[in-house]
Amino acid sequence: MSKIRGLAAALNGNGRYKLKASSSNMVKSSSRLDDGVIGLAIARRLAERFPSKTTFVVERHPAAGQETSARNSEVIHAGLYYPPDSLKMQFCLRGRQLLYEHCKNHSIPFRKTGKLVVAQDHQRAYIENLHARAQQLTWPPRSKPESSSGSVLPTRLIAGDEARVLEPDLSKNIVAALWSPETGIIDSHALMTSFEKDIKDAEGGALVYSTRVVRVDPWLGSSQVKGSPSGEVAEKGWVVQTVTGDAEENDAMLARTVINASGLAGPMVLNSLLPKDLRIPMYYARGSYASYKGPGVTYVSHLIYPCPGTGRTEHGFQSLGTHLTLDLEGNIRFGPDLDWLDPPPIRENPDGTEEADTDFWTKHLVPDQSRLKLMHQAVSEYLPEISLEGLQPDYCGVRPKLVGPDGGFQDFVLRTDYPETFTTNGVKVGSGAQGTNPMITLMGIESPGLTSSLAIAEKVVDDMLYKEDEAKADKAEEKEKV
Ligand SMILES: Cc1cc2nc3c(=O)[nH]c(=O)nc-3n(C[C@H](O)[C@H](O)[C@H](O)COP(=O)(O)OP(=O)(O)OC[C@H]3O[C@@H](n4cnc5c(N)ncnc54)[C@H](O)[C@@H]3O)c2cc1C
């Protein structure tokens, strides 16, 4: 494989949008976010926790969730695969519990199908290891056992023959399997619609579509510019500039808090504020799905996953292997496979600005026949009777990776920055002291991001922002006392 590049591109890299000084007639909002399942879940929680403040959700597409959140397996993961102390594991365990509750309370279609991770003889140790680790897990913060005997991650090792009782089409080469009863499937569009409804119904919630964030600058209040003209906003925060539709003019707003949950574009705001050598590279790993109608799956009723590869450049932290998923109508599809995309290089202009095609990955979203042969080979390892002719290209999704093919485990990243941390137009705006009015950037939110969405929202709002708010209130109280 040729060396895959990371794309360390910055928002507004070509410098088209200039800093607009914050003015008193600028729209002010408490928080602003982007709008996939993660942004929506956080906005919903914010609107619920801070009803008197404005939560402004900005999405570049005409509707929510048209990027990664609409292009995944729609599986509610149980939490089998991640290191026990990782955010991925903690959020998956907590998120799974919250998601099932949310589905029940909001009539979101879902089904706890259960899942089998199937193993050939040489893969036995892999599932035994998953099982042993599952037994040692403890409940994540805030979660309570669902029943007195409740294990946080129930799993059972079964023999190949028992697996074939559950799934008669499985290959005779499957000698053992790990049964995970907590795994399920969900209608992710209905989930996002329910989040949107809660935001719209909340007093301070606002959703703005077809609007792109084109520039974000830290703002320290009127002290930022020497001899600041009267009328400039004294408050601290972030000047967020947006363009709606094909408008020539851009708008600016002062956000007291910014939550950047822009999925595949996650690091780009930070990259526009960081020196070049500290920029965060983005890697893109496409996953293709194929629908299937044909022989060899007559009795399928559970999700079936192979053991992922265990090599240096092919392992379960990159992809779980081409598995069988079901949708809520019982249709079968296989995928996603793993296909690293090579981004085009960034072109430097003579004036130091840059041109980067940061949306190059959208050209790779059309599924084609080219992946089917490999998918057929992979699936035949556990479902030997399936036919190549029964596979049809279905759709593709792109994983927002922070490490390339040679990288190992990479956790979700939730990074907090304050306006003081950055320079604006090359001028350092503060001392670097930490304080209030954070920008929280979510990066590398690949699988199990959908499962984790409500837990991530809880973490960001209740732990990261609510505490900020409490600290502010304490400071204000202390001032009053003096
Ligand atoms: C192939 C694949 C399979 C997966 N399967 C599963 C699974 O079965 N279970 C599971 O739990 N997870 C799964 N995931 C992970 C899950 O889909 C993601 O973690 C989740 O959808 C990420 O949501 P997000 O909101 O962070 O990103 P996105 O859905 O990409 O949302 C980000 C939003 O930000 C908007 N945006 C970006 N830049 C701007 C800008 N400048 N201005 C305005 N808006 C902007 C985008 O338009 C987009 O709508 C899978 C992922 C992939 C790729």
Image (tube, grey):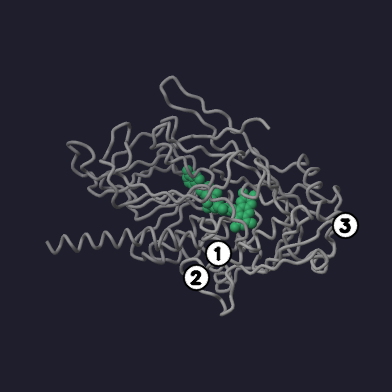
Q: Is residue 70 visible?
A: no
Residue at the disc numbered 3 = 295
Q: Is residue 155 visible?
A: yes
- The first of marks 3 and 2 along the sequence is 2
- The first of marks 1 and 2 along the sequence is 1
Residue at the disc numbered 1 = 93
Between marks 3 and 1, how big is the CA–CA gap? 36 Å
Q: Are marks 3 and 1 in contact (CB under 8 Å)?
A: no
Between marks 1 and 2, how big is the CA–CA gap? 9 Å
Q: Are marks 1 and 2 in contact (CB under 8 Å)?
A: yes
Residue at the disc numbered 2 = 143
Comparing marks 3 and 1, which lies closer to the viewer? Answer: 1
Q: Is residue 331 left or right of residue 458?
A: right
- Identified by mark 3, the residue type is Pro
Residue 153 in the image, given as x and y percentages of width and height: 60, 67
Q: Is the C terminus in the top left, top right, bottom left or bottom right quadrant?
A: bottom left
- The first of marks 3 and 1 along the sequence is 1
Residue for point 29% across, 33% down: 427
Q: Which mark is residue 393?
A: none
Observer-nearest residue: 247 or 233?
A: 233
Query: Disc 2 on helix, strand or loop?
Result: loop
Query: Disc 1 on helix, strand or loop?
Result: helix
Residue for point 41% across, 31% down: 15
Query: Disc 3 on helix, strand or loop?
Result: loop
Comparing marks 3 and 2, which lies closer to the viewer? Answer: 2
Between marks 3 and 2, how big is the CA–CA gap? 43 Å
Question: What is the tally of numbered marks visible in this picture?
Answer: 3
Q: Is residue 67 left or right of residue 464?
A: right
- Locate residue 123: give its quadrant: bottom right
